[in-house]
Image (tube, helix red, strand yellow):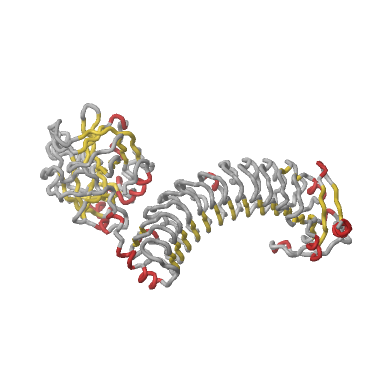
Amino acid sequence: MKKILKTYLIFLMIYGTNGQTVNCDYQYNNNFWMTSYQNMNDSGYTCSLITRELSFFQKLSRFRNHKAGRNDADVKWIINYKESKMKTFSSSICHKFPNLEIIDIGGAEMESIDDDALSNCKNLKFLMLNGNEIREVPEYLLTRNSKLIYFWINNNQLTTLPENVFINKKELVELLLNNNQINFIPSSIFRQLVKLEMLNLDNNELQSINPEWFVGLQNLKLLSLNGNQIVEIPSKCFAALKNLEKLWLNKNRIKTLKTDNFGGLQNLQILSLHTNELSDFPAGVFTQLTNLQELSLNSNKLTIIHSDSFDVHSQLTAVDLEDNEINAIDPKVIDNTAVSALKMTNNSCCQLDTETKSEIKANLKKCFNNYQPRHYQANAESCGKGVKAQGTIIGGSEVKRGMHPWIAALIAPRNKYFCGGTLISKRKLVTAAHCMLILARDITVLLGVHDFSKRHEVGRFPYAVQNVYIHPDWNPHTDTYDADIAIMVLETEVTYSKYIQPICLMYANSTLAEHSEGVVVGYGKDGDPKKEHSIIPKSINLPIHKNEDCFLKNYELARYSSKRTFCGGAGNGTGVCIGDSGSGLVVTDGSAYYLRGIVSASLNNMTYGCDVDTYSIFTNILHFTDWINELPVERVF
């Protein structure tokens, strides 16, 4: 055996510190996957690290010394065929072969890299150190490797990366960091990788995603974060990745999605979220993914699929919903898509695999029969139960007690009423952001109140406010009432009664959004200029108008409106007034009431303090229901 070994260990090179030995078999190598490096007479001149498998070399052209006319400076590749061992990557290799363009030393049981290991390899373009036992990358390892295109250091034992390791790596196209133990990544580490197209962070120990990682990665096409411990995707997380085409987030612990999670990804073609803990996702979460072709949501906990899930995806062809708990699907779910491959095996209501669009609809009939639209998903066991009121707030009739048990009165110190609100769950109320001019601890919420003159009214209960969430887009320093919405969270849960019940929420896909009339109930001024507000709540039926129609009535309204407001009013001397701010405008399907808007603004009038001969402005709740459900405490539905 010793004689055979001597036959195949053709050239022994001993060079460098730590007694490191590099055994080379010099050859021409034109059998490499990188097509730009298949020129046998140039870039193919290679040092193959000697393997222990002798039979391997029967397939190679071997040279005891360099091929005629070649020397160390001609060596462009160094390759390890996974049997040679190298505990430390020292500067030996780059000093011996200064013109290396490809270093492929995978599977060498390497544990460490010297700081200056690559300092003499200024032409290096491909660095593959995968499948070793490397625990740390020196911070300035790549300082002199400005031409680097590919860096693979996957399947090692890294736990983090130094902040400056990728400085000035403006040519880097592919970075593989998967199958390590990375639990922390500095915010700006990738910022200078302006040509990066692939970033693989699979199978690490990341618990969160930092949107700062992606700033500057305008050319990234593939991002893979499979197999981590991610629970939540931050808002606008991937907004910087304008050219991203493939996003994989499989095998994490993601429980919820937000409507703006995937904003900015207009070029995304493949999104995969399989094997997470999703039980639902809000309407519009995939809306901006107009080029989406494949969506994988299999192996989650989904129970219902709504039509607005994929309503703008004309290019969507494949959806995988296998291994969920789905028992109901909207019949219109694929109407506006190109879906021809829908996988639904291992769900509650059907066992469907890839079929044509017509076959899909036929075979999902049982799922369709179980479906109820989003706006029927009550935010409590019973919500929105009441009797349609009549009359007006100014000049109208009083509301019978219990007609609208979701109305709330907001009380400031010294027992002063200042705004209305609407109960939407046991701890949440909706009101107008412009009402929130005092601290949460100074607000008392009165529920079940009907007559302000009766301080000991049966069924009336005061509640302290624990916190107030004002929508981040609200700007009190502008004239517009855009995002004029706030959520109050009570310190304790309310006890439902016939006088205290929550309203139902509705979503943009609801047919109720097309209603042309709603009801407002409030304690605002009722026509008596001597009273600051009404003692008894009053209601009004208000026509709902498009903004354009309102502006024709009074163009001054345009100054206060936005795309997320609508206007309402009869323009006949009846309407909302001072004190009604924050109250809800509700609509009904005949069986329950649903919150449609929030009273935001009315024009002034010298007599009543508000101009009820024109229209009023309402915050459109349809734009904010997902934001409401993303806030702490319980989800509303």
Left or right placement of residue 622 versus residue 215 in this view = left
Q: Nearer the viewer, residue 105 or 82?
A: 82
- What residue do we see at 64% from left, 45% from top? 157
Judged left or right of residue 476, residue 24 is right
| 566 left or right of 225 in image | left
Q: Quadrant of the N terminus?
A: bottom right
**Residue 486 found in image quarter:** top left
Q: Residue at x 30, y 41 (%)?
A: 428
For the question of whether residue 605 can be seen, the reply is: no
Q: Position of residue 141 (x, y in %)?
A: 70, 43
Vertical placement of residue 593 versus 340, above or below: above
Residue 43: x percent and y percent? 77, 60
Q: Position of residue 520 (x, y in %)?
A: 20, 46
- For the point 77% across and 46% down, the residue is 120
Residue 254 seen in the figure:
yes
Q: Which corner quadrant of the image does residue 456 belong to?
A: top left
Residue furthest out toward the top: 414
In this rendered view, identify the residue nearer to me: 256 or 69: 256
* Residue 505: image location, x then y, percent: 28, 50
Query: Going by the image, does 423 lie left or right of 246?
Result: left
